[in-house]
Amino acid sequence: MAALKFLICLCFVQAALAKGSRSKVECTPEVMKVTIPMDGDRSITYLEQLKDYKPCQPEMDGNTAMFVLDLQDPHRCAVMRVLETNTGKRSFYSTIVIENSAGEVETVRARCVLEGRLRALSKRDVPPFPLDFNEPDVLNITRYEEGKAPEPVLGAIVKQNGKQVSGEISVTPGTPLTMEIFLNDKSAPIYGLLVNYMHVTDTGKQQETIILNGCSVDTYLFENFVTADGDTLTAKFKAFKFPDTTYVQFKGTVTVCLDKCQGVQCSNGQIAYGRRRRSISAGADSNKVYEVSLTTFIKVDFEDGQREAEDVLALLKNLKVANQRLGDMDGTPATVAEQTSKNVLIYEQETFTESKASYLTSSLVILVSLLLLFK
């Protein structure tokens, strides 16, 4: 009987350890380091949508995988940057996927926060109080409330016929696709979105602007972002590729506003963006609270035996011509490296979703079982 009890306890311990140990997140102004212990039944780990993308694979050291993500160029490995415009605080997010030998998936959402610089305060002359001014001895404060809206969390995906296309599945050039940029459920009731700028690259030196000041540069290749509710923006486009790579990287700067962002009047008469009401803004959004830099990848390649059709190759050529007409040849504001005056460890946090819950639940089951069996 004792042997049976011991065997049952051993099974519980093995089930808990199979989930693997906790991950660790370390932050500096330059990099985010995420250490993933590859113990238990864990087999592989990778960044979300970048399973086969070699430049963003983890460094392996025995049974430990480490992702070193560049915060000076967060687009490189699809790290999302959220800039709070009032304070200068920057938050960086990355989602890491861990698969076990059975194909089951757990995710780790890593986050780093870099505080912004303090603003200089200016002193101004204040007129003196009048001689007959009397301040009451007792102040009756009947109500005091303080609240803070959550930091927005955005996602960007590409769909083909309603199904998501990740960086792991290849599509052929000319395929009709749809890009969606959206707020999560917690942020959607509070904020609205506007895609201010977006460009596409071959992950190297070649890049072309596709959205400028909220409007599409070439609506035949990539249409304007539109919306039905202000919380999800969609744009239809045709898949295209660069000559020397199968990966196409989209880098965007998204304005996040309280309630809804103002629409932008584009040259074709369409209001792009998005906003629920057909409202046009002559200047910057007064309710702008965040600026988000995000990235998404797709894999585009010709099928075996398929010849490069001239009309497909013309898509990229026409985009280049449109950019030349705009004179947009002096870099991309979405990829400007940032500097900070504090070159020290700012923030450290490990964030788990399903994996953390499973780990805690398994540990509780073990403790309860041991107490009951050996009481």
Image (tube, rainbow, N blue to C red):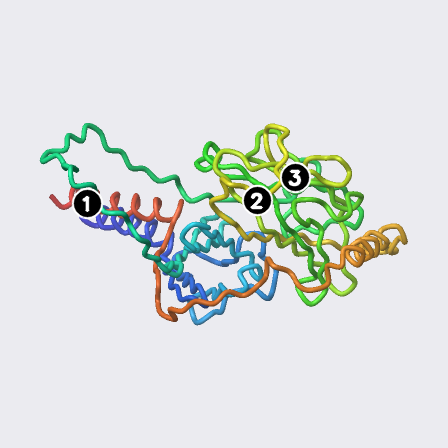
Badge 1 marks a residue whose secondary structure is: loop
Examine the rendered structure and indicate whether residue 326 appears above or below residue 28.
above
Q: Can you tell which of label 3 and label 2 is closer to the viewer?
A: 2
* Dot 2 amino acid type: Ala
Earlier-in-chain disc, 3 versus 2:
3
Hey, which residue is sitting farthest right in the picture?
Answer: 310
Q: Is residue 114 left or right of residue 206?
A: left
Residue 52 in the image, given as x and y percentages of width and height? 61, 59
User: Which residue is nearer to you in this view: 116 or 125?
Assistant: 125
Residue 94 in the image, given as x and y percentages of width and height? 48, 54
Question: Which residue is disc 2 drawn over?
Answer: 284
**Image quadrant occupied by the N terminus:** top left
Q: Label 2: few (<14), some or many (≥20) within 10 Å?
A: few
* Dot 3 amino acid type: Val
User: Which residue is nearer to you in this view: 114 or 39?
Assistant: 114
Residue 20 in the image, given as x and y percentages of width and height? 37, 56
Question: Which residue is disc 3 drawn over?
Answer: 264
Answer with the quarter of the image where residue 278 lies: top right
Q: Is residue 76 left or right of residue 65?
A: right
The reply to whether dot 1 and dot 3 touch (C-beta < 8 Å) is: no
* Dot 1 amino acid type: Met
Badge 2 marks a residue whose secondary structure is: loop
